[in-house]
Amino acid sequence: MEQGRIRDAIRFGKTALGIELGSTKIKAVLINSEYKPVASGSHDWKSSCVNGIWTYALDDVWNGLQDCYRRLCADVKERYGLELTNIGCIGFSAMMHGYLPFDKDGRQLAPFRTWQNTITGEASAELSELFKFNIPQRWSIAHLCQAILNDEAHVKDISFLTTLAGYVHWQLTGRKVLGVGDASGMFPVDSSTNDYDEGMMEAFQRKITPKYKWKIKDILPRVLTAGGDAGVLTPAGAKKLDPSGKLRPGIPLCPPEGDAGTGMAATNSVAAHTGNVSAGTSIFSMVVLDSPLKNYYPEIDMVATPDGLPAAMVHCNNCTADMNAWVDMLGGFAQSMGLKCGPDEIYPRFYAKALEGSPDCGGLVVYNYLTGEPVTGVNRGMPMLVRSQSGNFTFADFCRANMYSALAALKIGMDILKKEDVKVERLTGHGGLFRHAGAGAEFLAAAVGVPVSTMETAAVGGPYGMALLAAYALDKNKGGLAGFLSEKVFAGAKTTVTQPDRMDAEGFAKFLKRYTAGLDAEKAAGKIEN
């Protein structure tokens, strides 16, 4: 019976598709009319550091999207014996921020500068002072301002500036639009209008760009809230996503979003006083507020939910990437011993072993900085493992130290919200850190002192959230995104709640004290030439 309903949904286009371009994977999730994942596809990729800039080539974007979509179609064919030709609605999301400038003819003017870059310190400081509003280094407006300060020749020719999700959506629909959540990571958004802040735009135009013919408000994507009309898949767009020609044009697309917004949707965390933590290559928390913070802090970004509520974001550049490198190394050792095991076998044991470690990691400290970390003032990362002469050096403590390290910078930012008396009724974890053994939820709860919920879809993350935003665009009785998620999507969801453990909390505090004390050493290590 269930298979029959799924086949009918696929056959008659009663589905929604979310595709997210993350830092290490492009993932697609197809859901049915009951909002359940029914098929998926993925493609591995990674950024490259070219001339000191972390970037992805646009050819790799399209090769990756096509491969991811092809794998999704193969999954549909294998499971249900059907060709995927029609979809109810499609949504694209991607890593937020960054810099993708184009001229009037649609030509790319500079290599894509991703969120990983920490090269806009001068612009970030200048804009934060100008706006009296924190502008992180990774935001699009910081990259634009830095290009202006650098007197880069291409700036005068900019006709359109967008994010990765906005770029993909534009190529597939011809529409230069962006969901409000993603837009709020390009330029500050006024939560009372759900559009770019007019006063800040005027200030930017007046003080930063008087020598250019373009106006900032004309080169940014138009802002849409969740459920808005974002256009349809053009014939050329359908062919670009699916070169086989089987995908039909005319399919509606919902507003493209950033990975922060999809994380909120995937965890039912779009209402005030809810929050979520997305943990993968990077880690960030999103806490939805009643109103914007009164003060601004360099560690806190003020962004927006997909339907426009203000949200405080603590974004840390480093989370699981260095742990992945350790797991690869352990896999190599295992193979040298004649054992056949890869990440899928190692990770569950790694996480389970972390639960056996000493609450304070036995004196071990790990700095997982593959790139700079603005929250802790580190401009250039250098992974480090530090241990005391008298401390433990066990595998269990090593595993736990890696997981604590993935959460340490986030904890520093979250403490600021605590001092501001920001109310958090529930915090939901999703992403790779929450996949195995409950370790991610247990350690996060201990770190931030808040109960942490995880759902069955915890590891599905962003693309599932994007599929839900696509489904919301199809909903004919819109009662608001929060109601849609709570009453229609997650009403019967299986949720596990992990309470903070006192010993773990005390252990994490000791680890964090050592971690912060050693940051000067981490900063010094970052000066070592590769």
Image (cartoon, rainbow, N blue to C red):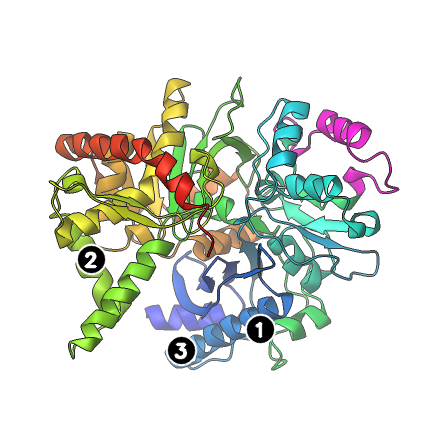
**SS assignment at label 1:** helix
Numbered mark located on residue 63 in the image:
1
Q: Classify residue 174 by image quadrant.
A: bottom right
Question: Residue 485: x percent and y percent?
Answer: 44, 43
How packed is label 2: few (under 14 Cα within 10 Å), some, or many (20 or more)?
A: many
Marks 2 and 1 sit apart, C-alpha to C-alpha, by: 33 Å
Q: Which residues are magenta?
A: 191-218
Question: Residue 179: x percent and y percent?
Answer: 61, 45
Mark 3, residue position: 80
How packed is label 3: few (under 14 Cα within 10 Å), some, or many (20 or more)?
A: some
Numbered mark located on residue 350 in the image:
2
Residue 449 relative to residue 431: left or right:
left
Image point 45% across, 29% down: which residue? 272
Question: Residue 209: x percent and y percent?
Answer: 81, 36
Mark 2 and mark 1 lie on one chain; the one further toward the N terminus is 1
Image point 77% across, 44% down: which residue? 151
Residue 471 relative to residue 451: left or right:
right
Marks 3 and 1 sit apart, C-alpha to C-alpha, by: 26 Å
Amino acid type, label 3: Tyr
Residue 284 relative to residue 122: left or right:
left
**SS assignment at label 2:** helix
Frontmost residue, 20 versus 76: 20
Give yes or no for residue 204 being in the magenta stretch: yes
Question: Residue 455: x percent and y percent?
Answer: 30, 49
How packed is label 1: few (under 14 Cα within 10 Å), some, or many (20 or more)?
A: few
- Can residue 525 be seen in the rendering of this structure? yes
Frontmost residue, 111 versus 81: 111
- Tell whether label 1 touches label 3 (CB within 8 Å): no
Residue 471 relative to residue 127: left or right:
left
